[in-house]
Image: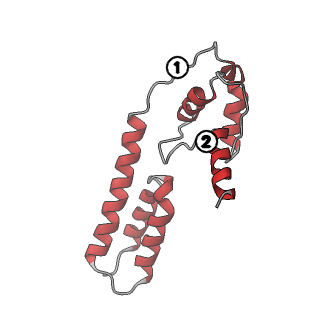
C-alpha cells in the first residue's frame, strides 16, 4: 500500500504530539513502514491506533495534573528558583538536604509544575535506595 506525501506529512506532524517516552519507537515504526514497498493497510491502521492512544494518554495526564501547593516552612522551598532552573537545564539533578527539609515531598511537585510527568515518569531516588543497591551489587 502506497501512502501519499500529504498523509506522510500529516503523520509526521502528529508524531510530534505523542508522549516523548514513545516517540522514538513510533517514529521508527513509521519509517520502517515507509521503507517497505508492500504494506498492508492494517499495518498503517495499527500505527495510527498507537499514535492516537499515546496522544490520548498524554492529554489525559495533562488535564489531570494536580495543583501543587508548596509549604514555605520547608527549607527546600527557599531554593525553589535554583532547583527549578537546574531541573530545566539538566537531565540529572542531585539535591542534598537535612532530613525533614522537604526533598521527598516537594521535588516531585516542582517537577509536576514544570510539566514533567506528562510525557513519562518522574524518577526519584533517596540515598538509602542508592546505598542499598550498591550493597546488593557488591555482595553478589
Residue at image x 35%, y 61%? 50
| Closer to the camera in the image, 107 or 53 | 107
| Closer to the camera in the image, 127 or 111 | 127
Q: In the figure, residue 41 lies in which quadrant?
A: bottom left
Please tell me whether mark 1 sits on a helix, a strand or a loop: loop
Mark 2 or mark 1: whose residue is earlier in sequence: 1
List x then y, in percent, for residue 31: 46, 74
Label 2 crowd bin: few (<14), some (14–19), many (20+), radius 10 Å: few
| Closer to the camera in the image, 64 or 40 | 64
Residue at image x 34%, y 86%? 38
List x then y, in percent, for residue 71: 58, 16
**17 relative to 115 in the view: left or right:** left
List x then y, in percent, for residue 51: 37, 59
Q: Is residue 16 above or below residue 35?
A: above
User: Residue tagged by mark 2?
Assistant: 125
Give the number of the disc on residue 121. none
Q: In this view, does 75 lie above or below 39?
A: above
Q: In this view, does 6 lie above or below 53?
A: below
Q: In the figure, residue 13 lies in which quadrant?
A: bottom left
User: Residue tagged by mark 1?
Assistant: 69
Q: Quadrant of the N terminus?
A: bottom left
Which is more foreground, mark 2 or mark 1?
Answer: 2
Please tell me whether mark 2 sits on a helix, a strand or a loop: loop
Label 1 crowd bin: few (<14), some (14–19), many (20+), radius 10 Å: few
- Residue that extends furthest to the left in the rendered view of this protein: 42
Residue at image x 63%, y 14%? 72
- Residue that extends furthest to the bottom in the rendered view of this protein: 37
Residue at image x 50%, y 54%? 20
Q: In which quarter of the image is the C terminus?
A: bottom right
How many numbered circles does the render carry? Answer: 2
Q: In this view, does 63 lie above or below 121?
A: above
Amino acid at each position: 500500500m502506497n501512502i501519499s506525501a500529504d498523509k506522510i506529512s500529516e503523520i509526521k506532524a502528529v508524531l510530534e504530539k505523542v508522549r516523548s517516552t514513545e516517540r522514538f519507537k513510533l517514529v521508527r515504526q513509521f519509517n520502517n513502514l515507509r521503507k517497505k514497498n508492500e504494506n498492508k493497510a492494517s499495518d498503517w491502521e495499527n500505527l495510527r491506533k498507537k499514535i492516537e492512544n499515546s496522544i490520548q494518554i498524554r492529554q489525559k495526564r495533562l488535564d489531570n495534573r494536580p495543583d501543587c501547593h508548596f509549604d514555605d516552612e520547608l527549607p527546600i522551598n527557599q531554593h525553589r528558583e535554583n532547583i527549578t532552573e537546574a531541573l530545566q537545564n539538566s537531565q540529572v539533578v542531585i539535591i542534598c538536604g537535612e532530613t525533614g527539609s522537604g526533598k521527598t515531598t516537594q521535588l516531585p511537585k516542582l517537577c509536576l509544575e514544570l510539566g514533567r510527568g506528562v510525557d513519562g515518569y518522574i524518577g526519584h531516588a533517596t540515598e538509602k535506595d542508592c546505598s542499598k543497591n550498591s550493597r546488593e551489587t557488591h555482595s553478589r
